[in-house]
Image (cartoon, grey):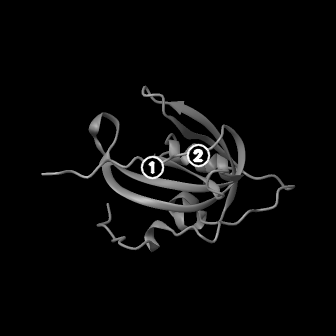
Amino acid sequence: MVGFPKVEKKFDPAPEGLFQAVCVDYVDRGMIPGYQGKLQAKIDLFWELDKINENSGKPFRVMRRFTLSANEKSSLRKFLEAWRGKRFTDQEIAEFDFESLIGKNCQVQISHDIKPDGKVFDSIQAALPITDKMVAIRPSPDYVRFKDREGHTEKEPW
């Protein structure tokens, strides 16, 4: 049987630094293997930066995956609290809706991870609120949310 040739997509990592960004999507990945192969509920958050990729002419897009946990020590909760600039109350975290993040601005700190094969990937380290002097940016009109893409199917809730 003849296989299809592997097509490697050209990926330009976002540059390192602190950038203004707008949240454009979140995806509930359901239960997938996490630490030591243990199944964990995961979500992905996506942002567009205010920095244009010269190769594509579009804003850089970045993503970070989180274990879905509201625990005070969880990475997700700490990340969201830093982004909003204050802690959640018990009621706020119990009622939190990820849909409310879409269109929200922040500043993201990006560093680079280098894989053993030499490939460079962007890595979001932190999110901070935008300052009063910053003008909010909007998602680019060509971005289509995962839930609205052709072929997307709803999965079972975790």
Q: Which residue is mark 1?
A: 9
Query: Which residue extends farthest front?
Result: 2
Q: Earlier in the sequence, mark 1 or mark 2?
A: 1
Q: Quadrant of residue 117?
A: top left
Q: Residues within 10 Å of mark 1 (few under 14, many from 20)?
A: few
Asked whether residue 89 is in view, the answer is: no
Q: Secondary structure at mark 2?
A: helix
When asked about the image quadrant of residue 23, the answer is bottom right
Q: Residue at x 51, y 40 (%)?
A: 73
Residue 85 image offset from top left, x and y in percent: 71, 49
Element at label 1? loop
The x and y percentages for residue 135 are: 81, 61
Return the residue found at the far left: 1
Q: Position of residue 41 (x, y in %)?
A: 36, 52
Residue 110, placed above or below residue 144: above
Picture coordinates of residue 31, whole percent (x, y): 31, 53
Residue type, label 2:
Phe
Residue identified by numbered label 2: 79
Residue 70 visible (yes or no): yes
> Image height check: is 106 above or below 73?
below
| Residue 15 drawn above or below residue 131 | above
Q: CA distance from mark 1 to mark 2?
A: 30 Å
- Foreground residue among 139 and 82: 139
Q: Is residue 74 left or right of residue 36?
A: right
Image quadrant in which the C terminus is located: bottom left
Question: At 59% across and 50% down in the image, what residue appears?
Answer: 80
Circle 2 residues within 10 Å: few <14, some 14–19, many ≥20? some
Type of amino acid at the residue the image marks with label 1 = Lys
* Count of picture labels: 2
- Whether tag 1 and tag 2 are in contact, CB under 8 A, the answer is no
Nearer-the-camera pick, 36 or 59: 59
Q: Nearer the viewer, residue 120 or 65?
A: 120
